[in-house]
Amino acid sequence: MRRRRVLVIPEYNEARTIIDVLSASEPSVDQIVVINDGSEDESAELVIAWARDLPHVTLINLPANGGKSGAMLCGFAYCYRCMEQGALSPDDLIITIDADGQHEPEEIPKACDYLERHGLDIVLGRRTLKGYPWYKHIGNWGLSLWASLLSGYRYHDVECGFRVMRAAVLPDLLSYYCGRKYSGDQEIGIITAAVGFKVDNRFPVGILYYRAGARIRDGLTNLVMGLMVALRVWLGRRMNQKQRVEAVLRRVEIVQPYTLNSGAGD
């Protein structure tokens, strides 16, 4: 039996691309969780209009922009609550992609099949970085090497936002994950490998275009946060994931666009 697939997609001011990404992803997943990270454009309204006939779409509105990592934390917390309530099982799959149109949603089924075929807990995409400036290659190499040293798994592209993971990863992830600015990808890579999940970073994914985003100071933040979460894992400094989930979701607005459609019950 095919596992349920949940797409978790953070977005901030992505009105230009968000609907195209969601439309291309929707046939390959069973549930979609969009985290609106305090967008100032009309992207949230576009998502609500697009999902008005789709009961499997949830929109989480954050009160202010806090960075991609914080938005991902909200998405993971929501999925954990769904698992607690029996709507998801530990073997169901959580998928993350970027909302800016860099990734190809058509690769989602291939990545899910790759995970199942190899008996993995996490599949992290590996980009060619073709078209990226030289300093991005160096930065990605350095961050991936840092994550490898801290986690014990050899990463080649720890910063890729395209991943598939079993929901069973969520309790440990929420126990150690901090999330600051762009540190989420680095933290996820370090935490999951360090606690013993089966990780694979060889799945090739295409990048449709290069988009400047993180800066040098963000890279330095990632290095520091990577060390912090590694120390937390090594020292066993776990947070109570249930309390954390409640604290995270208490400060957000959770919207089911389908229920806003006045004709949904007709």
Image: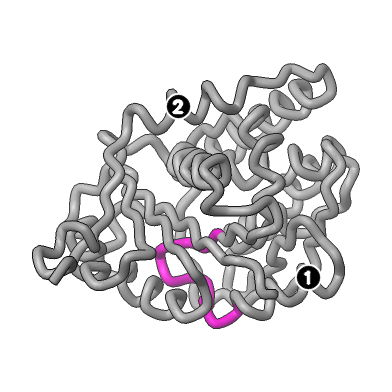
Question: Is 46 located above or below residue 186 in the figure?
Answer: below
The answer to which of 18 and 129 lies nearer the viewer is: 18
User: Can you see residue 151?
Assistant: yes
The residue located at (26%, 34%) in the rendering is: 63
- The colour scheme used here is one colour
The answer to which quarter of the image holds residue 250 is top left
The residue located at (69%, 75%) in the rendering is: 1
Please state if 10 lies on the left or on the right of 189 as rendered. left
Count of all numbered marks drawn on residues in the image: 2
The residue located at (70%, 45%) in the rendering is: 169
Which residue type does callout 1 highlight?
Glu
Does the magenta run of residues contain 98?
yes
Q: In which quarter of the image is the C terminus?
A: bottom left
- For label 1, the crowd category at 10 Å Cα-Cα, with few meaning under 14, some 14 to 19 and many 20 or more, is some
Question: Is 229 located above or below residue 43 in the figure?
Answer: above
| Disc 2 secondary structure class | helix
Please state if 130 lies on the left or on the right of 116 as rendered. left
Q: Name the residue under label 2.
A: 246
Percent position of residue 142, x then y: 75, 47
Evaluate if marks 2 and 1 touch, with contact meaning CB atoms under 8 Å apart: no
Percent position of residue 229, x then y: 70, 28
Percent position of residue 194, x then y: 83, 38
Q: Is the magenta stretch mostly helix, strand or loop?
A: loop
- For label 2, the crowd category at 10 Å Cα-Cα, with few meaning under 14, some 14 to 19 and many 20 or more, is few
Q: Residue 116 carries which label?
A: 1
Please state if 12 lies on the left or on the right of 178 as rendered. left
Which residue type does callout 2 highlight?
Glu
The answer to which of 165 and 30 lies nearer the viewer is: 30
The residue located at (54%, 33%) in the rendering is: 179
